[in-house]
């Protein structure tokens, strides 16, 4: 990032108008964010006051009377927490509009009686001045908020009650007050009213009930009724004397209403001041309640955000310290700086205000010898650091906390020479209530002052200082019309903080910081240097969106779409363009667009070849490897992997590390696909050696995203094909833990699928069964049926309660994904959920065919397994469809073997051959025949697949199983071949009955030897001797071979 302009070491200067704005009503300020605080529908009491003054030809006497009238209205409204919204001249004359319950005040339960008492006081005062008046008062719900545009706006109250108050004012007549029924109900306890005939007003069809206040009721009458309300609210018949005295004092305030009294009773009970004894036994007062305000202590009222009874300078100081607090701790040095800068007129009252907060019990001092201990406790698991964009407790977090409390003696230089003191806010919930309701204008000014304090006093070489300045400057510039200098400085420190977050592997906070920097830059006119700055921020952010949100995710696609300007039109690219192209490659791979991604990678390679840049070549090779892997071009893949291995060896010899591309060491991550490719090619022992090598390389780099990516590839690509469910669970669990620790959403989704696949009880039983069959050489069982997947001890299947998809942790990619979700499909198959498997396979096979994925034969094999598992042998309705079903399954297995054999996918070829052989054996058992040509064909494919596999010393269960099955079925074939010879002529019942599939029924004499039969017999014997090609030709030439459909 570019360094900001030199900082001003002088004292902070706050514009006089800025300070003045803080003391103006909210409606007069430039508060574009105030709507979040003030705009709502709330209970209000609206009062319209008409003054009988003629301002059309004003003289000095009229002007003086107007000022006096306004002063009397203010004296009546303001002490009762009301708002004088407008004072204007219109067609109705000179008007004043007052509202009870309008921001910044909250609605009170006795707003109706406050308004009536204020109206009666205004009438009396203006009558003494010789000014006529009429007043209308209504109560109800109304909208409170801003109306207008950013050019001019005002706070207003809108609703039917506002219009009705104006109508009642016109009907009241000179010297009169009219109130609505709602206002009457809320104030009739304190005031005696005269009910007038209903009046018809504009906007209402039905007449409106109106009342005229006559006088304030006597104390004794009101006090008696209040005691009755209290007894009813508490559910008792009599009150203790101290409780009666308390409510008598409330009555003397002259602003009681039934709702208000019931609210006080509720506060007394909820906060433990009064205990209601069971069974109407009475009420017990816990302690002296004479000093309670509305049934609450001062701290309890503050805990609810009630600051109305505080002095103004104490109110503002309480809000400042809540704003500055971190884990309820704040520095007096910083609080004095912000308070004095924002409120210069109150600077001399700082210590007095601090003492007042201490006396009220709002704050308490932390002794100097306890500061380090308290700081250590609050630094562990700090809940507020996530708000700052940091969440891992480390040395930087500790330094951050020290600087926020001005405890870093080496970096903080206080020009006053004042000893720093640390205080703690002890009122529960006070900080949250204050910060949530604090006006944005206050926040922006205070953030600016805090940033000025740290820029002048903090050590800017420390990363924690950058994080502090980024937080405060970004909030200070977060409004519609910031100046360019403040925006650029905010973006500068945010960028530095994001780099610190990336160095600490806090990728999600880093992305949020960079996004915030881009949004702040959008607030000033876009010029060339600003556009370049945004591109730099996007280039920093884009690779980490791949880690956090996933390859091909909407977030990463959007991030790289904004970087297209960095890619030149020519054939050569610079380093930044190469990194952008590599990220685009990964996104294309995430969408299964391997051909397009490979073209991008080839462009990087060509650029490296033209410029001789080794880094470009390595990035191009590592970007091309995934495309070659997923399309099954393993020969080319091995070629580039050898180059990457040589390049990495060169880095190791020099003691350096390969380039970080897309947030990882791309060379090592590309090599993590090597073991799976070697395994699929049939070299099982070689795949193990390469897997160990790549794992050691990843561990040696000590880079969590790289380690996690390598482990995710191994547990999703290699170990499932190896059949090591336990090893897959272990590796996936470690990858899942690392991904959760560092916000690696892409790896977390892959590891989660692999972990659920490996932990699936039926998956484990499947591989245990496979191993047992390879050892016992037992009879054939249905490979895919869930009822065959039992434990060795005969226990029943356990319920697998895990969901196949975790919506919270899954990377949201295209629905056509088929590579890693193959583990999900396999898990569904193991659990017998075949209908869902078939539905998902339809799109997966299409996608695999489209992009040439090497898993296409595996998906077809799984489809065949679904056809087998869903077929009901005992259903008589399925007999007619059996030939089509057999043809579909055999065609699927033939297709698997053809694709895998043509592309050199040895392991997949072996899996398909074993499944086919087991299926044909099952068909022979169902049909009661010894063998038929399809059994012989599947047996020959299994033999060929075994010849291709290089197992070495590794005990690979599928190979052992295949060898056992071949040996077992060769004996059956040999016996069947001997039965077809001359020595079977003496068998009884010489019936020449042939099955529909070219075999013979058990227990019946096979047909006599013919030239065709001899040809087939020679083919069988040749098959046993290993002459596969000749045997198949002989079988194809016999009538026992394939028919047209086969």
Image (spheres, grey):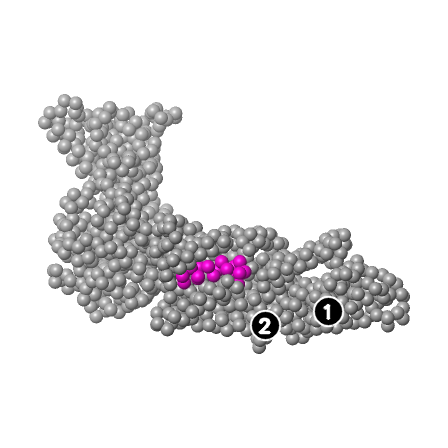
Q: Residue 950's mark?
A: 2
In this picture, residue 1036 sits left or right of residue 430: right
In this picture, residue 515 sits left or right of residue 895: left
Q: Which residues are magenta?
A: 617-634
**Nearer the N terminus, badge 2 or badge 1?**
2
Circle 2: element type: loop
* Distance (Cα) linking label 2 and label 1: 22 Å
Badge 2 density bin: few <14, some 14–19, many ≥20, Cα 10 Å: some
The foreground one among 652 and 756 is 652
Task: Work out which residue is located at the far front of the displayed protein and give it.
Answer: 610
Above or below for 74 versus 556 = above
How far across and down, in percent of the image, does residue 262 sit? 34, 46
Q: Is residue 628 magenta?
A: yes
Q: Residue 698's mark?
A: none
Q: Residue 1023's mark?
A: 1
Circle 1: element type: helix
How far across and down, in percent of the image, does residue 978 sit? 81, 71
């Amino acid at each position: 990032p570019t360094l900001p302009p030199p900082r001003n070491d002088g004292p902070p200067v706050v514009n006089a108008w800025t300070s003045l704005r803080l003391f103006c009503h909210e409606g007069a300020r430039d508060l574009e964010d105030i709507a979040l605080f003030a705009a709502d529908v709330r209970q209000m009491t609206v009062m319209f006051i008409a003054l009988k003054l003629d301002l059309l030809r004003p003289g000095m006497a009229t002007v003086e009377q107007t000022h006096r009238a306004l002063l009397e209205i203010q004296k009546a409204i303001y002490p009762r927490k009301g708002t004088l919204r407008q004072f204007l001249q219109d067609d109705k004359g000179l008007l004043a509009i007052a509202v009870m319950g309008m921001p910044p005040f909250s609605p009170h339960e006795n707003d109706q009686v406050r308004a009536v008492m204020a109206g009666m006081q205004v009438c009396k005062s203006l009558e003494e001045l010789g000014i006529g008046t009429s007043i209308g008062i209504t109560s109800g719900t109304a909208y409170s908020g801003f109306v207008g545009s950013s050019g001019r706006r005002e706070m207003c109250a809108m609703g039917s009650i506002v219009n009705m108050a104006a109508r009642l004012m016109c009907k009241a007549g000179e010297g009169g007050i009219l109130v609505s029924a709602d206002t009457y109900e809320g104030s009739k306890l304190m005031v005696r009213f005269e009910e007038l005939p209903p009046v018809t007003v504009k906007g209402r069809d039905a007449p409106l009930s109106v009342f005229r206040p006559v006088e304030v009721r006597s104390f004794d009458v009101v006090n008696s009724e209040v005691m009755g309300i209290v007894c009813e609210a508490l559910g008792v018949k009599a009150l203790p004397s101290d409780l009666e005295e308390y409510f008598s004092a409330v009555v003397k305030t002259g602003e009681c209403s039934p709702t208000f009294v019931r609210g006080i009773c509720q506060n007394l009970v909820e906060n433990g001041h009064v205990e209601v004894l069971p069974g109407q036994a009475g009420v017990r007062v816990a302690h002296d309640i004479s000093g309670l305000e509305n049934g609450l202590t001062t701290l309890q009222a503050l805990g609810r955000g009630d600051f109305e009874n505080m002095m103004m300078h104490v109110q503002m100081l309480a809000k400042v310290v809540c704003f500055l607090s971190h884990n309820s701790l704040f520095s007096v040095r910083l609080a004095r700086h912000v308070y004095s800068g924002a409120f210069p007129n109150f600077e001399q009252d700082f210590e007095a205000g601090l003492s007042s907060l201490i006396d009220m019990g709002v704050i308490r001092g932390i002794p100097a010898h306890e500061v380090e201990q308290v700081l250590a406790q609050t630094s562990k698991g700090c809940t507020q650091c996530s708000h700052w964009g940091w969440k891992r407790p480390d040395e930087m977090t500790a330094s951050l906390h020290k600087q926020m409390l001005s405890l870093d003696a080496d970096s903080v230089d206080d020009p006053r020479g004042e000893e720093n003191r640390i205080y703690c806010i002890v009122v529960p919930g006070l900080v949250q209530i204050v910060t949530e309701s604090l006006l944005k204008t206050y926040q922006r000014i205070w953030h600016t002052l805090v940033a000025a304090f740290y820029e002048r006093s903090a050590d800017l070489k420390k990363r924690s200082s950058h994080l502090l300045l980024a937080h405060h400057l970004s909030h200070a510039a977060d409004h519609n019309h910031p100046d360019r200098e403040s925006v650029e400085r905010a973006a500068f420190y945010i960028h530095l903080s994001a780099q610190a977050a990336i160095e600490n592997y806090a990728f999600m906070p880093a992305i949020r910081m960079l996004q915030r920097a881009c949004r702040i830059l959008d607030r000033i006119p876009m010029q060339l240097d600003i556009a370049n700055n945004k591109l730099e921020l996007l280039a920093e952010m884009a690779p980490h969106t791949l880690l956090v949100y996933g390859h091909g995710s909407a977030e990463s696609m959007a991030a790289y779409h904004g970087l297209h300007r960095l890619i030149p039109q020519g054939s050569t690219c610079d380093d930044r363009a190469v990194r952008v192209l590599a990220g685009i490659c990964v996104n294309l791979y995430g969408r299964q667009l391997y051909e397009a991604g490979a073209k991008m990678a080839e462009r990087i390679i060509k650029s490296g070849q033209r410029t001789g840049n080794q880094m470009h070549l390595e990035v191009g090779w590592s970007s091309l490897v995934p495309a070659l892997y997923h399309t099954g071009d393993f020969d080319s893949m091995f070629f580039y992997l050898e180059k990457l291995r040589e390049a990495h060896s060169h880095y190791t010899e020099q003691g350096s590390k390969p380039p970080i591309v897309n947030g990882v060491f791309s060379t090592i991550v590309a090599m993590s696909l090597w073991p799976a490719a070697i395994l699929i090619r049939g070299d099982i022992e070689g795949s193990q050696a390469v897997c160990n090598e790549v794992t050691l390389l990843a561990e040696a780099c000590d880079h969590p995203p790289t380690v996690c990516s390598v482990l995710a590839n191994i547990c999703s690509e290699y170990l499932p094909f190896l059949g090591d469910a336990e090893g897959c669970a272990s590796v996936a669990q470690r990858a899942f833990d690392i991904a959760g620790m560092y916000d690696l959403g892409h790896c977390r989704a892959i590891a989660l699928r692999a972990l659920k696949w490996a932990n699936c009880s039926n998956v484990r039983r499947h591989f245990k069964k496979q191993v047992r069959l390879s050892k016992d050489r037992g009879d054939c069982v249905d490979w895919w049926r869930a009822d065959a997947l039992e434990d060795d001890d005969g226990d029943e299947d356990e319920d697998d309660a895990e969901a196949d998809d975790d919506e919270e942790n899954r990377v949201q990619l295209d629905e056509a994904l088929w590579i890693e979700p193959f583990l999900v499909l396999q898990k569904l198959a193991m659990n017998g959920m075949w209908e869902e498997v078939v539905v998902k396979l339809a799109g997966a096979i299409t996608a695999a065919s489209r992009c040439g994925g090497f898993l296409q034969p595996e998906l077809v094999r799984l489809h065949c397994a679904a056809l087998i598992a869903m077929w009901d042998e005992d259903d008589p309705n399925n007999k007619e469809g059996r030939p089509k079903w057999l043809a579909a399954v055999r065609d699927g297995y033939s297709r698997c073997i053809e694709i895998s054999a043509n592309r050199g996918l040895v392991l997949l070829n072996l899996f398909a051959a074993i499944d086919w052989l087991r299926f044909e054996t099952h068909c022979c058992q169902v049909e009661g025949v010894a063998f038929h040509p399809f059994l012989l064909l599947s047996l020959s494919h299994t033999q060929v697949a075994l010849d291709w596999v290089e197992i070495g010393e590794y005990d690979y269960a599928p190979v052992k199983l295949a060898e056992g099955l071949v040996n077992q079925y060769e004996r059956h074939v040999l016996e069947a071949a001997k039965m077809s010879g001359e020595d079977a002529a003496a068998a009884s019942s010489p019936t020449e009955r042939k099955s529909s599939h070219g075999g013979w029924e058990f227990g019946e004499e096979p047909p006599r030897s013919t030239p065709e039969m001899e040809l087939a017999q020679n083919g069988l014997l040749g098959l046993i001797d290993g002459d596969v090609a000749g045997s198949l030709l002989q079988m194809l030439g016999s009538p026992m071979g394939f028919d047209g459909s086969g």
